[in-house]
Amino acid sequence: MGEDKTVTAHHTALWKVVLTLIAETLLFIFLIYTVFNFVKVMDIFLILITMFFVAFPLISEKYLSLQINGMFFVATLVYACGNIAGTIFCLFARTLWCDKLMHCFAGFLFASLGYYHLCFQKKCEMRMINKNIFAFSFSMMVSVLWEMVEFTVDIMFHLDMQFDMYVNEINTHLISDSFRVVTHINNITETVVGDTVFQGYLDIGLFDTMYDLIMGAAGALVLVVFTCIDRDRHPLAVLKSKKA
């Protein structure tokens, strides 16, 4: 654990430059599409921030003497572009898998940051299992905090970041004679609210929140499995020495 996390300085790999240019081009197309179709200032702002975020790994390698792990590099680009595409094309609302996939990527990325944060600490002699516990816990903490942000925004600004969905069965004790008795209701085909008929019971974000947390945990678990197999041979980032 006390090994030197430095490598000899070298030029950034060409494939990283190419992938970054592809991602930046894609984001620029999204920007033009947004300007001419939605004219939403917030979407434009998010795309511009993401364009900087996508370029940051290359900037880090060039000016901060870091060499970014290839897997983490690709995951960062996919997560950044996927989030923007899901936002401006409403993919998060139209498809369940897109939102959950992004939460899985987020779980992996934040677990990576938590794990390798410890690796760069001076005199850090923690066992791998302890670093993985911290990484997994750090990632889950970020996931929980994000769900709290979504809940707060929905309550304060009457939005629907915690997406509603229809469910066809519920378990409840509220309509039973005792709190110790749970009533199971299935085959819910419609729910009537006023004059509006819904296709089933309208869940108000619980399922979305739990699916998000589960996918975030799955992404963090991918990092745990990777580090156990890799044994720190390919860290998230290593310092490049000043030697030519």
Image (cartoon, rainbow, N blue to C red):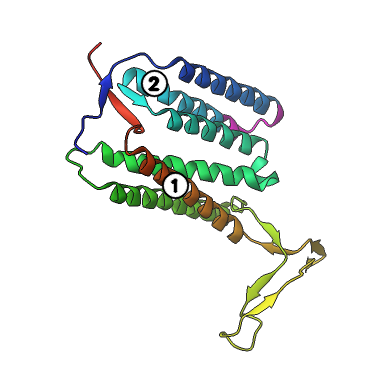
Residue 40 falls within the magenta-colored stretch: yes
User: Is 125 a magenta residue?
Assistant: no
Q: Earlier in the sequence, mark 2 or mark 1?
A: 2
Task: Please state if 187 lies on the left or on the right of 113 as rendered.
Answer: right
58 to the left or right of 178:
left
Task: Pick the quarter of the image with the C terminus.
Answer: top left
* The N terminus sits in image quarter: top left
Q: Is residue 35 left or right of residue 180?
A: right
Q: Residue at x 27, y 38 (%)?
A: 119
Report which residue position mark 2 lands on.
59
Q: Which residues are magenta?
A: 37-44
Between disc 2 and disc 1, the foreground one is: 1
Q: CA distance from mark 2 to mark 1?
A: 26 Å
Provide the secondary structure element on which disc 1 rests: helix
Please say if 8 is above or below 101. Answer: above
Query: What residue is shown with label 1?
Result: 220
Q: Residue at x 27, y 42 (%)?
A: 118
**Residue 236, percent across and down?**
36, 33
Front one among 112 and 58: 112
